[in-house]
Image: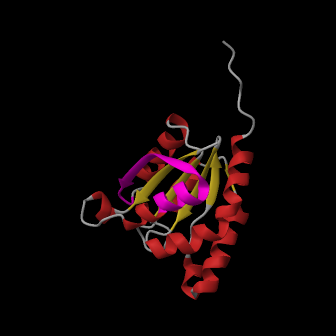
Amino acid sequence: MRWKVALLSASDKGARGEREDTSAQVIRELVEEELGGDIIDYRVVPDEQDEIRAALIEMADYYQADLILTTGGIGLGFRDVTPEATLMVADRVVPGLAEAMRAAAVAKSRTNVLFRGLCAIRGRTLIVNLPGEPKGVNDHLMPVMDLLPEALAQVSGPKKETRV
């Protein structure tokens, strides 16, 4: 089974076309090579709660992504609102996954303790917040990559069979 993965980048400069989203390529490679998934939607939005929230809802509910990976907006800055937007659309949180990501990343750099990203579930979609830079993506996502197939299988639950 190939997982349907959506990628959402929260970046004011990226949304204005002033910065290339280099973390998206890292995620695309990890999703395809390590997870066995396909990117079904990708977009860049400004660091605005309403826009992040609307994109998450559309990706989960309309595109029915199994996994949404967000990048950016997880720091301590005033405009870093991705975790708050994620909480607004979440049915449940998955604290252990975010804790494992943070612990592994902190072992590489103490400043990763400032990572505010979280993991949550909306319906049958797992949402994972990641940093906005490629190294941060790799440092946070790789330590839990082997857990994602099991997490996704549990979140997606049994699929309904359709009869003809």
Residue 76 seen by the camera: no
The stretch in magenta equals: 27-47
List x then y, in percent, for residue 27.
48, 61
From the viewer's perspective, is residue 155 above or below residue 62? below
List x then y, in percent, for residue 59.
49, 43
Residue 13 image-quadrant placement: bottom left
Residue 117 seen by the camera: yes
Residue situated furthest front in the rendering? 33
Which residue shows up at 42% across the image and 71% down it?
78
Q: Is residue 149 left or right of residue 78?
A: right
Colouring scheme, one of rainbow, by chain, secondary structure, one colour: secondary structure
From the viewer's perspective, is residue 138 above or below residue 44? below
Which residue shows up at 56% across the image and 49% down it?
37
List x then y, in percent, for residue 126.
62, 50
Q: Is residue 123 left or right of residue 11?
A: right
Which residue shows up at 30% across the image and 57% down it?
15
Q: Nearer the viewer, residue 112 or 79?
A: 112
Residue 93 image-quadrant placement: bottom right
List x then y, in percent, for residue 121.
65, 49
Q: Quadrant of the N terminus?
A: top right
